[in-house]
Amino acid sequence: MQTNGTLGLIATNTVAQGDSREVGLDAMVANGFTITRAIQSRSWPAASANLEYAAIWGTYARVSEAVPRDADDMPVARISTLLEAEGRTTGNPVRLPENSGIAFIGCYALGMGFVVEPEEAQEWIAADARNAEVLFPYLNGEDLNQRPDATASRWVIDFNDWSEDRARSFESPYERLVERVKGERQRKKPDGEYALRKPLPERWWQYAEKRPALRKAIAELSEVLVIARVSKTVMPLRVPTGQVFHEKVVVFATDSYPTQTILSSSLHQLWAIKYGTTLRSDATYTPDLVFGSLPRPESTVRLTEVGVALDLERREIMNRRGVGATKLYGMVNDDTLRGDRDIARMRELQVAIDEAVVFAYGWTDLDLDHGFNEYRQATRWTVCPRARVELLDRLLEENRRRALNQQVPGEVADRGPGNEITLID
């Protein structure tokens, strides 16, 4: 390995995200590489390619702390493998046992033949009331973020893990799947083998991913918190159960208002943006990495009160104005939009949410200084840059503290390089 000279590379922006970062940049830095300049994510300068790229410059040679470094054209003291200014705490968070069994990705049907228009679903139920046992609203990420009431625009056939004989007794739904799903599922390659992995061809009337753990976790709940896996808002909403959740929706198996407040905070949003991934410039929520590692504070009365206020007032504003979450938060984050009472109230609620969460952590010494601030190529109504760096540092430190306290002796806490927690004897 050469220890003199510099290295420059260009890659898609995923090079600084998730597993790609762990096996690439994390490993390089762990072996002595210093990043001296970085572009975290920019649009490729050609209309022929719709992608976001990252650029990295650095060296394996020793770099003095006095040497200036540049992250997205801003001078910084150090640059992390996330290709942004590094705080005092380095490395990646680890998954916490306390967060297991709560956040789930929705069902993956694999076949548009499962999807039914609402009118047809009601006709089938009217013709045979038993069909209500296998027909449900089908909530996807677009419905969640675009519709004012966050309801599903379509329905879906769901035979769960039933046998084919039991499914066949529901005549109209079963025949629909015979016509529109069975052939595609049992499609074969030129060599005669099934094109899809087993058991998908044999169990063609069932979803590719039925999510039994999710179903069990929410079985006794009438409401849950959900968030679109890909969104600009990274904002959870409260919705009823009794519907099928699409794989582009993350479901939190809880109806807790304090949890809703925590997940609606700028702290959670920044954590998700920093440690999740992106689809072009939109945040992609990865529940095992983001929620799985988030050190949540204890519930408080204040968290409950703010969560209730947020849910009731936001729901009323969205329905009255006929806007979904994406459009509403687009207005909240628009620094040119002034004088709108609803939007002013939403900004007030965001301040109240963040203050309640910070108070629950016991971090009463922080001045959040809310305003319109840019982070990861997006301007949002959020905490100031100074507070952002400090909050992310404290969250990572708390994650490390809990990981040490909760670690089972002899188990590896995290496989990513750069973590000080490796093995507890």
Image (cartoon, rainbow, N blue to C red):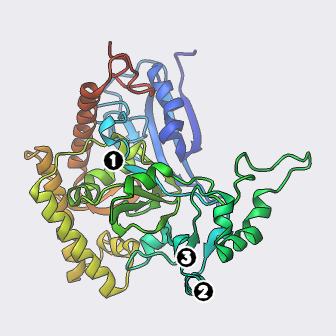
Label 2 sits on residue: 127
User: Is residue 158 positioned above or below 37 on the image?
Assistant: below
Q: Position of residue 47 (x, y in %)?
A: 65, 63
Residue 130 disc label: 3
Residue at disc 2, secondary structure: helix
Q: Position of residue 193 (x, y in %)?
A: 85, 46
Residue 410 disc label: none
Q: CA distance from mark 3 to mark 2?
A: 9 Å
Residue at disc 1, secondary structure: helix
Amino acid on which disc 1 is placed: Trp
The structure residue drawn at horizontal position 60% and vertical position 83%, both measured from the top left corner, is 124
User: Is residue 220 positioned above or below 324 on the image?
Assistant: above
> Which residue is nearer to you in this view: 277 or 263?
263
The quarter of the image holding the N terminus is top right
Q: Position of residue 57 (x, y in %)?
A: 50, 34
Q: CA distance from mark 2 to mark 1?
A: 49 Å
Q: Is residue 54 left or right of residue 383?
A: right
The mark nearer the N terminus, 3 or 1, is: 3
Label 1 sits on residue: 271
Do tag 3 and tag 1 residues touch (Cβ < 8 Å)?
no
Amino acid on which disc 3 is placed: Arg
Amino acid on which disc 2 is placed: Ala
Kindly tell me whether residue 275 is visible in this rendering.
Answer: yes
Q: CA distance from mark 3 to mark 1?
A: 45 Å
> Which residue is nearer to you in this view: 192 or 69?
192
